[in-house]
Amino acid sequence: MEEFAADREAVLTRALDAGVTAVVAIGGGAAPGTLDCGLAVARLAPAGGPKIWATAGIHPHESKDATDASIVELRALAADPAVIAIGEIGLDYHYDHSPRERQRELFSQQLALAAELRLPVSIHCREAWDEALALIAAAQLPAAGVLHCFTGGVGEATRVLDLGFLLSFSGLLTFPRSQEIREAAAFAPADRILVETDAPFLAPVPHRGRRNEPAYVAVTAARLAELRGWTVTRTAEQTADNFRRLFRRAE
């Protein structure tokens, strides 16, 4: 994203200094020729920095701009070994930047592609739990996936876990009004949780209001450790193991 254009290498250096050894650059775009942004970042990774993996997918906000050629391009990008998942895909009924019918159609197409390629998926779901989880269940994904930037409570977490998915927790875990998310983070099985930044958004307390960056995931991991009664070291090891087990290409 343009927020990192000026100091991307410094950001990655700070990430490594904070103990972050691997980063996932989320793919985006919709029109053909715009879908490789995650891969572009992975290919620019500086020597000696964190390993950078990528995803490729069409975000629900951009569904209205996608075409059949977008799916063809997505399939080609997914053949790159640096692409570890199809994502970020899903439904967003909060902003409705794209018509809901088009969001559902494209989500189903991308789930089908992930099933065919046996790749996991990174799911964006906002105010669309029933429809998103129904479409995921119908896709019968062989490689499951993760609910990125999880925003639900124990009830939603249970439904996601029943599908075989993991839950990924962002800086929201540190926000004062996020008690339901904290309850879900404490409730989830140890082998079904991940941590993330959602950079440049959702910087955790005490960095809230600033541009988020990968180094700050350590803050979220520390809060997760508190909630579960773990050491930070155990939290880091557990979430790293979970990551490698879900994203097989990252092994």
Image (spheres, grey):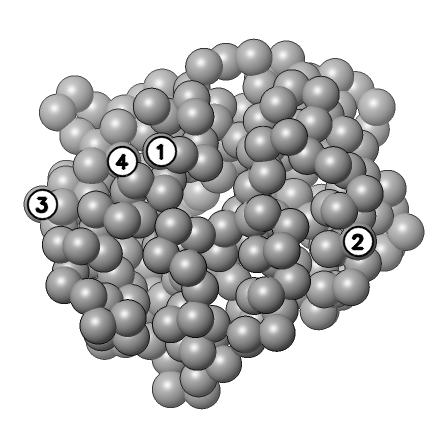
The residue at which mark 3 appears reads as 17
In the displayed image of the protein, which residue is found farthest to the right? 101
Q: Nearer the viewer, residue 145 or 88?
A: 145
Residue at x 40%, y 55% (from the top left corner):
193
Measure the alpha-carbon separation of dots 1 and 2: 26 Å
Q: Disc 4 or 2, which lies upstream in sequence?
A: 4
In this figure, what is the number of numbered marks? 4
Give, as a three-letter code, the residue at label 3: Asp
Which marked residue is nearer to the observer: mark 1 or mark 3? Answer: 1
Q: Disc 3 or 2, which lies upstream in sequence?
A: 3
- Horizontal arrangement in the rendering, residue 243 relative to residue 155 (left or right): left
* Circle 2 crowding by C-alpha within 10 Å: few under 14, some 14–19, many from 20: few
The residue at which mark 2 appears reads as 134
Measure the alpha-carbon separation of dots 4 and 2: 32 Å
Give, as a three-letter code, the residue at label 1: Arg
Measure the alpha-carbon separation of dots 1 and 3: 21 Å
Number of the label disc, if any, that sits on residue 68: none
Q: Secondary structure at mark 4?
A: strand
* Circle 3 crowding by C-alpha within 10 Å: few under 14, some 14–19, many from 20: few
Q: Nearer the viewer, residue 207 or 145?
A: 145
Residue at x 9%, y 45% (from the top left corner):
17
Q: Secondary structure at mark 2?
A: helix
The residue at which mark 1 appears reads as 244
Give, as a three-letter code, the residue at label 4: Ala
**Residue 30 x, y percent position in the rendering:** 69, 34
Which marked residue is nearer to the observer: mark 4 or mark 2? Answer: 2
Q: Is residue 206 above or below residue 225?
A: below
The residue at which mark 4 appears reads as 22
- Horizontal arrangement in the rendering, residue 60 relative to residue 45 (left or right): right
